Image (cartoon, helix red, strand yellow):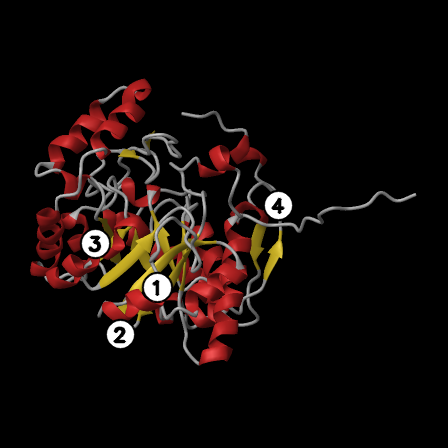
């Protein structure tokens, strides 16, 4: 007698469980086009620096723009709560591990200073860089007019999970279709991990979607809440929503895979899974130019009642240019991410990101261990 089944689970896959299949033709890596666009804004590399205080400050945003990418400034963090953010960042870096969370909770409990919101944006714009900023849904209505007036180029509305239908005590919650009508700049929304949620967000008229719940190196949402979907499956499902919405509306909405990256191979797999761009946090926190001084912490870490992150020491491994473009002597794929992407595209015969979406991928849980006995047995330094 068979037992009844209440739920049937489907298998979901992360970066380490899949591999890219080489194409039937190959292309010189330097002939690949990796441009990425949000509305009428085009970037020469499809990499976005995360809206995390250890990663992006105004100076880092300017540097990232010079290299052809985009960095997102967190408008609810240290940069807009303190006139002297460098002193605060130094204090975080100097604090012992067992006291870091309590310190961050105290630091982030301070209110946002609206004059600093404008000031930080203007610093980026006056340097000639594209300026993207991030706010949570709770503060979007209040800060959106200030953001637009200051001259920001992209508004990102971001939380652990964001949906088009949110139930709250407010009679007039944040409706993205109405926000889009009142804001003149592109609106990017995140984060989501499912086909249906992504499709509903796209139908509100937003410009792009962030994909990923809990994969970040400094995030503990998966442990604390038990929510999340591995990034390959999440990206594939949201890319399927993009294609469905494209057929429905004729409008292409980019999918940005956010979090979980360590090496170049994972970045390449995200694009085959359907990403149009990727958002990096801990990888870029290791740059000499990053404000975290070798440390990194999650955006939900300072929550006053339920922290969902931890401060981690990532170290300083090289310049931003080395991490993005090389040259490098590092052999583990943690530097020259753009070189890795172009090389993988060449191997797959993909001239651009859209063609990379068509590359084949297989389930391959042994892809990083097969034949690597000598590497796996090496003593750690």
Per the image, the residue denoted by label 4 is 365
Q: Position of residue 271 (x, y in %)?
A: 46, 61
Per the image, the residue denoted by label 2 is 40
Q: Are marks 1 and 3 in contact (CB under 8 Å)?
A: no
Foreground: disc 1 or disc 4: 1
Between disc 1 and disc 3, whose residue precedes? 3
Does residue 155 appear in this view? yes
Where is residue 157, by image quadrant?
A: bottom left
Per the image, the residue denoted by label 1 is 176
Which residue appears at 55% of the width and 63% of the height? 22
- CA distance for labels 1 and 3: 14 Å
Between disc 3 and disc 2, whose residue precedes? 2
Q: Are marks 4 and 2 in contact (CB under 8 Å)?
A: no
- CA distance for labels 1 and 4: 39 Å
Which residue appears at 21% of the width and 54% of the height? 142
Query: In which quadrant of the rendered image does the N terminus lie?
Result: top right
Q: Position of residue 194 (x, y in %)?
A: 52, 57
The local secondary structure at tag 4 comes to loop
Per the image, the residue denoted by label 3 is 142
The local secondary structure at tag 3 comes to helix
Residue at the bottom extreme of this rendering: 250
Q: Nearer the viewer, residue 130 or 379?
A: 130
The local secondary structure at tag 1 comes to helix
- CA distance for labels 4 and 3: 47 Å
Q: Nearer the viewer, residue 12 or 136?
A: 136
Please tell me the numbered disc located at residue 306: none
- CA distance for labels 4 and 2: 39 Å
The local secondary structure at tag 2 comes to loop
């Amino acid at each position: 007698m068979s037992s009844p089944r209440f739920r049937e689970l489907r298998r979901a896959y992360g970066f380490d469980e899949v591999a890219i299949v080489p194409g039937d033709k190959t292309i010189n890596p330097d002939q690949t086009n990796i441009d990425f666009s949000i509305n009428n804004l085009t970037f020469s590399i499809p990499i976005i620096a995360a809206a995390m205080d250890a990663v992006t400050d105004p100076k880092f945003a300017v540097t990232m723009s010079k290299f052809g990418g985009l960095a997102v400034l967190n408008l609810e963090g240290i940069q807009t709560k303190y006139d002297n953010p460098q002193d605060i960042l130094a204090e975080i870096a100097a604090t012992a591990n067992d006291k870091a969370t309590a310190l961050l909770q105290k630091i982030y409990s301070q209110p946002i200073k609206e004059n600093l919101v404008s000031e930080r944006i203007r610093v980026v714009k006056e340097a000639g860089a594209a300026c993207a900023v991030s706010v949570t849904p709770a503060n979007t209505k209040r800060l959106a007019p200030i953001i637009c007036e200051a001259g920001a180029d992209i508004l990102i509305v971001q939380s652990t999970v964001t949906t088009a239908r949110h139930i709250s005590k407010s009679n007039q919650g944040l409706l993205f279709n109405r926000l889009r009508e009142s804001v003149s700049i592109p609106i990017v929304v995140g984060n989501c991990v499912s086909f249906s949620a992504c499709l509903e967000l796209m139908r509100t008229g937003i410009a792009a979607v962030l994909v990923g719940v809990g994969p970040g190196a400094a995030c503990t949402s998966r442990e604390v809440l038990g929510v999340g979907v591995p990034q390959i499956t999440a990206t594939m499902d949201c890319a399927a929503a993009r294609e469905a919405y494209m057929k429905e509306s004729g409008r292409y909405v980019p999918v940005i895979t956010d979090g979980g990256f360590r090496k170049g191979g994972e970045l390449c797999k995200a694009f085959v899974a359907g990403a149009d761009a990727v958002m990096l946090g801990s990888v870029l926190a290791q740059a000499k130019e990053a404000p975290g001084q070798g440390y990194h912490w999650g955006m939900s870490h300072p929550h006053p009642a339920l922290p969902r992150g931890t401060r981690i020491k990532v170290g300083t491994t090289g310049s931003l240019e080395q991490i993005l473009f090389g040259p490098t002597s590092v052999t583990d794929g943690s530097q020259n991410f753009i070189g890795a992407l172009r090389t993988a595209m060449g191997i797959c015969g993909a001239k651009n990101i859209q063609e990379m979406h068509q590359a084949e991928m297989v389930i391959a849980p042994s892809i990083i261990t097969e034949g690597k006995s000598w590497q796996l047995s090496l003593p750690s330094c």
